[in-house]
Amino acid sequence: MTAARDTEWFDRPDPTGRTETGEKGLRFECTLCGNCCSGAPGFVGFTQDEAVAIAEVLGMTTEAFIERYTRDTPQGRSIIDIKPAGSPHGYDCVFLDRETVPGKAVCGIYEARPAQCRTWPFWGSNLTSASMWNAASEGCPGMNTGGLHSPKHVRLTRERVDI
């Protein structure tokens, strides 16, 4: 790792500028709002191993999962999103469940969700600067709250996906 990577903005004390704690790292705790799984039509990529795991959770073959729950995109296969009738949230991932837990949005494939989902909000696109992180936090009430994630954890998580 280069020296520059050892001193990214989230390595400095109080990196978001929203508090005066002097902490290094970033705070995040999922609130089950579903905002990261909703909005404009999107792209949720997955690996072949993830497809196998998701299919197993769903009790179907991998081929059936791919045929029923994914679509071709210029970036590769993506899990489909749907627009529930009358929904104020826009499009939802097909596996987002807003019914089972009142007031919460839960993932129907949580234990097998793709790395793209597991690594939110520590995506490279959110970590380019404190202002980008803070902009993303406007749509995610779990960002800048909850547990503190060390700079090392943030970097390792970011490196798992290219988003």
Image (cartoon, rainbow, N blue to C red):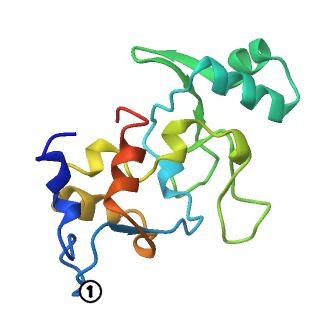
Quarter of the image for the N terminus: give it.
top left
| 157 over 55 or under it: above or below | below
Q: Amino acid at mark 1?
A: Thr
- Position of 158 with respect to 55 (left or right) is left
Locate residue 63 relative to residue 40 in the image: left or right: right
Query: At numbered mark 1, what does the secondary structure look like: helix, strand or loop?
Result: loop
Work out which residue is located at the far left of the displayed protein and give it.
Answer: 4
Q: Residues within 10 Å of mark 1 (few under 14, many from 20)?
A: few
Q: In this rendering, is residue 147 above or below 119?
A: below
Tell me where residue 10 appears, x and y as whole percent. Answer: 23, 62
Residue 91 visible to the viewer: no
The residue that appears at 60% across and 64% down in the rendered structure is 32
Which quarter of the image is occupied by the C terminus? top left
The residue under the point 66% across, 38% down is 94
- Residue drawn 49% across and 57% down? 35
Q: Eyeballing the image, is 63 above or below 23?
A: above
Q: Is residue 129 left or right of residue 112?
A: left
Q: Is residue 156 above or below residue 28?
A: above
Q: Residue 58's x, y, as percent?
A: 83, 33
Foreground residue, 101 or 14?
Answer: 14
Give the residue at x 37% y 38%: 159
Query: Quadrant of the rendered structure where residue 99 is?
Result: bottom right
- Residue wearing tag 1: 21
Image x and y of residue 24, in percent = 27, 71
Decide if residue 69 is on the left or right side of residue 139: right
